[in-house]
Amino acid sequence: MALLDAIVKTLRAKGWQRAKSSCIGAGQTGATMSSNHTAEPLPLVSRRASGLKGRIRVPGDKSMSHRALMFGAVAIGETTIRGLLEAEDVINTAKAMTALGADARRGADGVWRVQGVGVAGLRSPSQPLDFGNSGTGVRLAMGLMASTPLTAQCIGDASLSGRPMGRVTVPLSQFGTTFETAEGNRLPLTLKGAKNPVPVTYTLPVASAQVKSAVLLAGLNTAGKTTVIEPTPTRDHTERMLKGFGAKITVEKKPDGNHITIEGQHELAAQNLDVPGDPSSAAFPMVAALITPGSDIVIENIMLNPTRTGLIDTLVEMGGNIVIENRRLAGGEEVGDLHVKASKLKGVTVPAARAPSMIDEYPVLSVAASFAEGVTRMEGLEELRVKESDRLAAVEAGLAANGVSTRSGRDWLEVDGGGAKGGGTVVTHMDHRIAMSFLVMGLASAHETKVDDSRFIATSFPDFTGLMNGMGAKLTPAT
Ligand code: S3P
């Protein structure tokens, strides 16, 4: 644990700290909520830049990093992970796995090593598990714990404590797991894992890889076959990675969707994993280069799993000059280098069917759309309402503050192109992707843009500012 705390310290030393309140750690119990707010907000300003240049790497994929730690925790033996995303969300997952009995630590060589305890080996943590800002962390961990007779309290920051957990407590209860939650099925919650879990067949009511994964992970320590029916495909890292760990998992494509079945109570074998760059983090320099005249950059080693590439497809449709170079297979995933040049973009309609493959990318796509010619319409956005913030509302407010007209409904958004004026302050609502999106906007706006608080960028992309400024961006603390 001490090493993990040291890593969090390093992240904070980079200037992106979210000091935790005193409610957990240091032997304290009875915590109900973690908090980022003992430190002051860190407003940042972004100014017009004259062409981004360079070859960069963005940090490891967040979805794969969470999963690598969790699956390593219940495998037999030592799992090694290279390229793990060392950002707050993932460090919180590493801490949670350690608290559950599986030692996860970073070596001096930068490689993470997880000592797995087997599918039935997790034990009750002695303190609440603090997942900070991360929906993926808490929801997948709830699944992982659900079929083992342990008791765990799960807490998170104010953003996470406002997000719906019923989408996982409902299916997990069918295994025999019980929950005590705050009002409205929210955090903080106490989970009691099932002693004699029964296998479940569950049809996903929302297109959510987190819910799919939670149910499959509960199936790991449940005798018999657990099946998730997924009418709309979502990111499939859980299926791919579990297969790599030797799980008995099958995927059948049927008329009503993918049927994913896992046979429980078979041990997993520790793996040596390499995590490629996160396409959801690459999205920010990619859009920055497209909208900033004179830009020419390469973003190396990006994961190109087809369930994650909706933004690239959309930007190419809009006229974006994005060439994928050096396509190759690494660690069971397709990866490549993205060569991106400044481009004249045009508005398009983004169909609802594409939403799951770019669900985290709509804020930055909206920024790209504001610099396109004509209107961009995005459909199927209902899930944006329950992310780290209500992203539909946050994006619209941020665009309006910077002179961009929009129209929206419950699950759609239209953005008028023609270029953002800038000059506004964006309220980030504890949401890393809102902060990064509007810092990207400022690089090509007539006037500077300001975000009210950049601290949450550390949840997924701690060195965002350094990396962007290294290519010629002008992101500076607000005075
Ligand atoms: C994730 C799934 C998505 C995504 C999140 C990461 C995952 O959430 O928004 O950032 O790793 O499974 P949903 O599955 O709830 O849409």
Image (cartoon, rainbow, N blue to C red):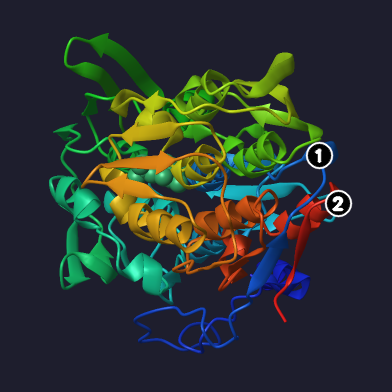
Image spot of residue 29 (x, y percent): 41, 86
**Residue at the location (48% across, 24% down)?**
240
Q: Nearer the viewer, residue 125 or 447?
A: 447
Q: Are marks 2 and 1 in contact (CB under 8 Å)?
A: yes
Number of labelled discs?
Answer: 2
Pick the quarter of the image with the C terminus.
bottom right
Q: Could you tell me which secondary element the residue under label 2 belongs to? A: helix
Q: Which residue is mark 1?
A: 56
Q: Which residue is mark 2?
A: 470
**Of label 2 and label 1, which has the lower sequence position?**
1
Q: Judge left or right: residue 338 versus residue 389.
A: right
Dot 1: within a 10 Å radius of its alpha carbon, few (fewer than 14), some, or many (20 or more) residues? Answer: some
Tell me the quarter of the picture where residue 349 sits: top left
Image spot of residue 158 (x, y percent): 38, 74
Q: Nearer the viewer, residue 243 or 159?
A: 159
Residue 100 bears which disc, if any? none
Image spot of residue 364 (x, y percent): 53, 44
Q: Nearer the viewer, residue 38 or 25?
A: 38
From where the camera sits, is residue 118 visible? no
Dot 2: within a 10 Å radius of its alpha carbon, few (fewer than 14), some, or many (20 or more) residues? Answer: some
Give the spatial CA distance, label 2 vs label 1: 9 Å
Q: Nearer the viewer, residue 227 or 44?
A: 44
- Mark 2 vs mark 1: give the one in front: 2
Query: At label 2, which amino acid type do we have?
Result: Gly
**Residue at the location (49% across, 39% down)?**
417
**Residue at the location (70% across, 18% down)?**
324
The quadrant of the picture showing ligand 1 is top left
**Residue at the location (48% across, 62% down)?**
431
Q: Could you tell me which secondary element the residue under label 1 belongs to? A: strand
Q: Judge left or right: residue 235 versus residue 50.
A: left
Query: At label 1, which amino acid type do we have?
Result: Ile
